[in-house]
Amino acid sequence: MKIAVLFFAYLVGGLFLGGLLAGFDRIVTARMQSRKGPPLLQPFYDVLKLLGKRNIVVNNYQTFCVACFLVFIILTGVLFFVGGDLLLTIFALTVASIFLVLGAYSVNSPYSTIGAERELLQMMAYEPALLIAALGMYWVTKSFHVNVIASYSHPLIMYLPGIFVSVLFILTIKFRKSPFDLSTSHHGHQELVKGLTTEFSGPSLAMIEVAHWYENILLLGFVYLFFAFNPIIAIVATIATYVLEILIDNTFARLTWQFTVASSWIVTGATAVTNLLILTFFLK
Amino acid sequence: MQQISFLLLFPLIPAILLTVLPKGLLRTIIVWFSSLSLIFVSIGLATNYMGSEASFFSIDSPILDKLFFAGEIILSLYFLWRCVGIKKKEMYIPILIAVQAIVMIILELSGKLPKVENAFYVDNLSLIMVLIIGIIGTLICVYSLGYMKEYHEHHSEMTDRSKSFFFIFFIFLSAMYGVVLCNNLIWLYFFWEVTTLCSFIMIGYPKTEEATRNAYRALGMNLIGGLGFTFALFYMVFISKQPTIELDKLIHAGPALALIPACLICFAGLAKSAQLPFSSWLLGAMVAPTPVSALLHSSTMVKAGVFIIIKMAPILQHTTAGLLLASVGGVTFLMTSLIAVSQSNAKRVLAYSTIANLGLIVTCAGVGTYEAIWAALLLVIFHALAKGLLFIAVGTTEHKIGSRDIEDMEGLIVTKPLLGIVILIGIAGMFLAPFGMLISKWACLKALIDASPVLAVLLAYGSAPTLFFWSKWMGKILSVSSKTKELDSRIDANEATALISLAIPTVLTCLLFPLIAAKAIEPYCMHIFGQTVSLSRGNGIIMAIMFGLMVFIPLGFLLFSKKRNYVSSYLAGANVTGSLTFKGSMGLIREVKNSNYYLTPFLGEAKLTKVSLFLGGALILGMFVAGIL
């Protein structure tokens, strides 16, 4: 019963909060660029408009893959917010992302193929950091279950500062923000030709958009865990993290994939792995 | 005991019959009949003993001892005979053979061999292996019926020696049963060497210069491992305080007494399972016909290597030597996963991924805790299934499209739907939730973080490149362009049977794995370690939900497909013929060609291999030093 309530709360709340977050993102970004920006609810208007459009596709596999992407992102979020296994959540997130990549591959357009390759490179870049973060949380709380981790009475951030830094680093990739927004980088002068979403339009694009909302809420949930000992601090920290990501997005130019993969692995090694090893040495 | 002797001896009958009788319908009937018999008896043995504690069988027959001794000598003589005319740099091979033969003769003639109480045994681990050999091994044999026929049609310059191929195939199966069922280590060693012999002959099957050299390399490396085995036997008989040549007694002796022979046997296992620095023989084995690769990679040979290492786990648990052994596996997993990214040859990708996954199994076995062994056994089962499936699918694809390059598999889902789907299932089985290998990886991470965080970090890093190389392969198969039309050549019935019979269990394991864990794996951990992991119910349900989604979303798609408008994809200019060609700059008509990233400047095979060989060698050396100290 409790799970069912949480499930529907996430289904509705994730959609609502995710959309608002996207609107918030656009306003803050606009202010940073000295513009006024769209209304807060603009992302909802956008998605509604996309849903009303004709369904134009290159083949059937692509729509199938996008539908799977959305469903698995939601499933991942549900797993996380009902307090499931953190590792399993990460693996489910991987499955979801792979579906998006396969969708991009299936249309066989040069732009979306490059987008797909880059998305995979990005996944390769962030995967170790996510897994090591889960391992670190397990070491401190002795459980992989999100509900146990979230109800841990001490501040996790005190034990896992290095791991938190690496998570911040790879969140830039996950939020598809500059300097690591490689897979959705666009063709000069054309916003429409945008990396792996090039061949998606109308309802399919709306699904991708909504999936990203859910995904962002999930990722912020992950950040929340580090501060979960005190919900108020945690919410403030989560919002601050997102604002920081927007700031980074607006102050950096896009970097190459070589730099993305190498820097993520090195940063993860220097911060998260060091953190984990010190932790396992002192805290048995 | 009857069933055990059947499994050991029965394969010899089809082996001889297939050599004598002509090929054609008769061969098909014999292969089918013997395969079904082996499957039937393997399952029979499993249902009799699965879940119970290890059962031992004693045979008091000095004649058998003599026979095995004679067999070993004949084997050595045969190897020596095959060494006539080898290259200069392969001269180490006859030396290895001679040393092994001398050690074995000293052992036999010294009269110090301890009496063997139980020659054979059955426990859950050997039953898992019996099922893998019995079901996957025989299915690959059925597959070979179709494959070898086409193989010789494609390679008409080669003399058809498929009679000897099937002969060796059944001998191989028999030897594998011997490896997993013998408690007498001298007999086990004999079967161990027979698997080396079989792989040597099978790799050299094409008789090209490359195949011959690779066959000798496989022989040489496995003999280096075999030397470890003979030294272990020598130690156990002459040096050990409690002389024994029985597997169960060795394991019960504990680390204080048995650590050195355990390290030596694990060394033999490392060579057999192609861990660093021995990885090159398995890559070289690719020159052989595909069923050979499928057999070596999934159900036999390399699995014998990890089998014996898993057996040694209780001795290695909590020792420095065990930890170093685990690091050999961990480093192998990381490095070969990285190298696999740079490969476009499908068989080489599969080979590197095999080495990587075996590395993971070795890591778990080296750690040796009950959690780690639980994960290792899951890996053994699921890897055998998915890898056997992938190899035979790639073999058939190679015959149909004339290439084993991943780039040429573009749009396979349309050109050859069955093969496309089967390869997608196999790949999903290798790395995606909720399929088998991912469940095992998950169990591995949990086991490793408890035992050694460094190893868990290796796993975290190593699993990232696996994502990359599997997904880009899946992407290629799904890349549909308008030039891809369905090919009309039919797939041989034997091949299709094997493909489907392996694909279905790969999918079903998503649902059945809690059952497999409860029936086969947990009792083993319980008997060996006194405790076991049991899967939480909630996670099982989540897996089932994921599986359901993967099945029902496509169904829903078929039922409720709305009207869609089809267009061709966006190219870098005006499209000319669909998504196939476009008018680029200067009005030139260009063809669309998309290729995957292989990151060769960063993850070049040559560069990484050097580092990996060094690391692997150093860690093995470390293992021995730690074992002796």
Image: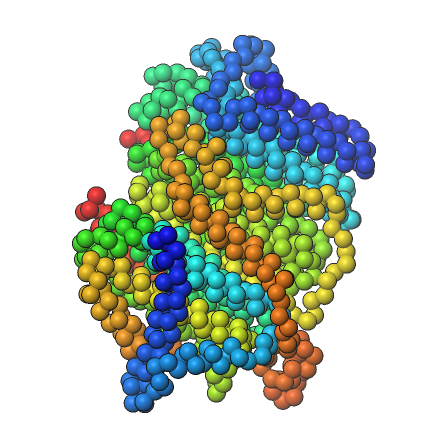
Does residue B529 show up?
Answer: yes
Q: Where is residue B311 in the image (x, y as percent from the top left)?
A: 43, 30
Does residue B48 lie above or below A195 as drawn?
A: above
Q: Where is residue B583 in the image (x, y as percent from the top left)?
A: 65, 84
Image quadrant for the C terminus of chain A?
top left
Kindly identify the residue that appears in the image at 45 percent across and 81 percent down. Answer: A46
Kindly identify the residue that appears in the image at 45 percent across and 19 percent down. Answer: B246
Q: In this view, does B458 lie to the left or right of B245?
A: left
Kindly identify the residue that appears in the image at 59 percent across and 71 percent down. Answer: A107
Kindly identify the residue that appears in the image at 43 percent across and 59 percent down. Answer: A75
Rendering quarter of residue B65: top right
Nearer the observer, B457 or A177 = A177
Q: Where is residue B261 in the image (x, y as percent from the top left)?
A: 39, 26
Q: Is residue B90 left or right of residue A216?
A: right
Does residue B340 lie above or below A36 as drawn?
A: above
Does residue B110 show up?
Answer: no
